[in-house]
Amino acid sequence: MEDLALFLILFFAVWYIEALEKSRSEPRELVLEFIEDVWTYFRWFCYAFAILGTLALLVGGYILFF
């Protein structure tokens, strides 16, 4: 849980700094960009979790049956 909290803090900090750099943009545009970034990172997390889970099942099955 601490790793997740640290990731979220760093993610929001980086997003906030990027938002400050793009302060000329409209707030609505920044919020939409933030939602898009969150969705992208969530998708990549799910992909990584699925790949690692598949590898764990393959290795576990190999160890169990051979």
Image (cartoon, grey):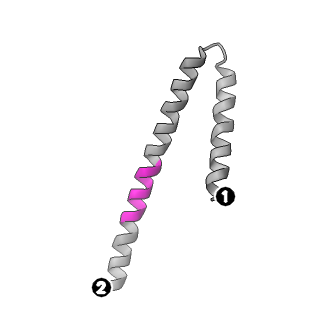
Q: Is residue 2 above or below residue 30?
A: below
User: Circle 1: is it few (<14), some (14-19), or many (20+) Cα within 10 Å?
Assistant: few
Q: CA distance from mark 2 to mark 1?
A: 36 Å
Measuring from the top left, give residue 52's x and y in whole percent: 42, 62
For the residue pair 4 and 53, the one nearer the viewer reads as 4
| Quarter-of-image position of residue 65 | bottom left
Quadrant (top left/top right/bottom left/bottom right) for the C terminus: bottom left
Residue beneath disc 1: 2
Q: Tell me the mark number nearer the camera, choosing from 2 and 1.
A: 1
Q: Secondary structure at mark 2?
A: helix
Q: Main secondary structure of the magenta part?
A: helix
Left/right placement of residue 62 relative to residue 9 reads left
For residue 40, which numbered disc appears in the image? none
Q: Identify the amino acid type marked 2.
A: Phe
Residue beneath disc 2: 65
For the residue pair 52 and 5, the one nearer the viewer reads as 5
Question: Which residue is located at x 51 percent, y 31 percent?
Answer: 35
Question: Which residue is located at x 36 percent, y 64 percent?
Answer: 54
User: Circle 2: is it few (<14), some (14-19), or many (20+) Cα within 10 Å?
Assistant: few
Left/right placement of residue 57 relative to residue 11 reads left
Left/right placement of residue 61 relative to residue 16 reads left
Marked residue nearer the N-terminal end (2 or 1): 1
Q: Is residue 46 above or below residue 33?
A: below
Task: Determine if the magenta segment contains residue 48.
Answer: yes
The residue positioned farthest toward the bottom in the image shown: 66
Q: Is residue 44 above or below residue 64?
A: above
Measuring from the top left, give residue 2's x and y in whole percent: 67, 58
Question: Which residue is located at x 47 percent, y 50 percent?
Answer: 45
Measuring from the top left, give residue 64's x and y in whole percent: 34, 84
Q: Secondary structure at mark 1?
A: helix
Bounds of the magenta segment? 45-54
Q: Identify the amino acid type marked 1.
A: Glu
